[in-house]
Amino acid sequence: MLDPQSTERLRKATLDTCRACGAADPYLFLEYGEHSPGQMLIRPEDMDDPQPAFPLNAHACLECGLIAVADQIPENFFSHYLYVPSGAATMHSHFEEFADVITERAGTEGLIVDIGSNDGLLLAACNARGCKTLGFDPAENIAAIAAERGVETHISYFHPQSATEVSEARGKAKVITTTNTFNHIGDLDDFMEAVCIMLEDDGTFIIEVPWAKEMLEKAEFDNMYHEHVSEFSVLSMVKLAGKFDLEVSDVTYLDGIHGGSFRTFMTRKSAGFPIGPNVQTMLDEEAAVGMLDKAVYDTRKQEFDAIGRELHEMIDRLKAEGKRIAGYGASARGSTTITYYGIGADDLDFLVDKNPLKQGLFSPNTRIPIKPVEAIEEEQPDVLFMLAWNFFDEIYAQQEAFRARGGQFIVPYPRPRLVS
């Protein structure tokens, strides 16, 4: 029998209801074990100190297809954040395209508010088009980087109180955007209430997140971690919007962004926006994959575990050949991969990352040193384990010198392969 402390810990690590549609008892299909938060990198002086760790459990809502973990991260955790999108060239071109879409909806007079605006990359592109913009982000260190780009940031979490304060001071928003941030939100109802407070009557709320259908279909469960508490289906977006008199009036599939993402356009039902044909098309694709079928999740979990066994076999074989292996990307999703599969400092000599905020630190859980990308040429590993596999094409093109001397890449998903 569990003691009271263990019972309470388990309760906090599991979900009683779906945070999108409210259905009871989401199906717990994957238990990752205890993980330190993926962005909680370790400073050298703290290497001997214990890290806080939380159970990580993936649940599937069999009513709407939301894949989720319990929200156990303290609210002040993101006051100092380490991820910035500007480190990837792919995100620069992506946000340039997105800025055109936003500008078409907002014009140059309508206010654009970006929630989780990070280093201001998206809003800087909007500013270049003559738009009025404001960012929302709780991380002061990242807001300072955005300011260097000329992007104004309201340093706060986005909730009804802060939305009321800002809308009274700046007016309502014609377009509210959030990119790869909506999946961080534990209380979606609170967030959506704030959106409704701030959005103009004929405004648009645009969300970009990874698509749970792609994640399930390819068993890419590395994208679950404590900060990514939800992976959305289109159906979960439809049901969530309906709770707030909004509707999903359009969706766009985004190939090559975070392993396959989608852009959702939510508008007020009273505004009368036409429903685009993509909405039903993507709902049909989700149904075909079996997003509401318990047996599908069990099968994909087995495939995810098989990937781990194949990776260990590949790493062991390369090590037996005397090869040195480094990891590329000190990302949170990469932390999930190596922590769950038990790939540690004996397997990877070091990690590299383009983000200077991460360099000189150590990975959570596994305590592998993180170095600048230049270390690839300085230390000349034979193999790069692609923890940032979702940017593989970009990284492959950049690593011309590594490839020229015979370097190889381990790409873990959707199935492990060794690329020469």
Image: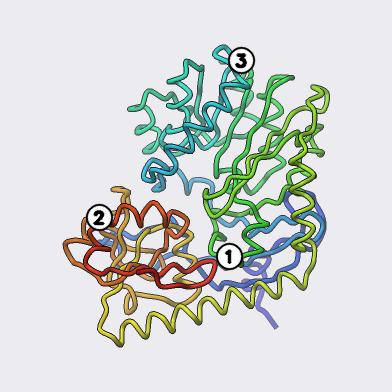
The amino acid pointed to by label 1 is Phe
Give the Cα separation between the discs numbered 2 and 3.
43 Å
The mark closer to the camera, 2 or 3, is 2
Q: Toward the viewer: 375 or 182?
A: 375
Determine the secondary structure under disc 1. helix
Q: What residue lies at 47% left-to-right and 49% top-to-bottom?
A: 77
Image quarter (top left, top right, bottom left or bottom right) of the N terminus: bottom right
Locate residue 107, reporting x and y percent: 58, 16
Q: Quadrant of residue 393?
A: bottom left
Where residue 300 appears, as percent x and y from the top left, is 66, 72
- Mark 3 Cα shell of 10 Å, populated few (<14), some (14-19), many (≥20): some
Within the image, what quadrant is residue 246 found in? Answer: top right
Q: Is residue 284 above or below residue 310?
A: above
The three-letter code of the residue at mark 3 reads Gly
Tag 2: amino acid: Pro
Which image quadrant is residue 379 in? bottom left
Circle 2 residues within 10 Å: few <14, some 14–19, many ≥20: some
Whether residue 169 is visible: no
**Mark toward the start of the polypeptide (1 vs 3):** 3
Residue at the spot of label 2: 372
| As drawn, 416 above or below 119 | below
> In the image, which is nearer the foreground, mark 1 or mark 3?
1
Q: Residue at x 25, y 69 (%)?
A: 406
Which label belongs to residue 221?
Answer: 1
Q: Earlier in the sequence, mark 2 or mark 1?
A: 1
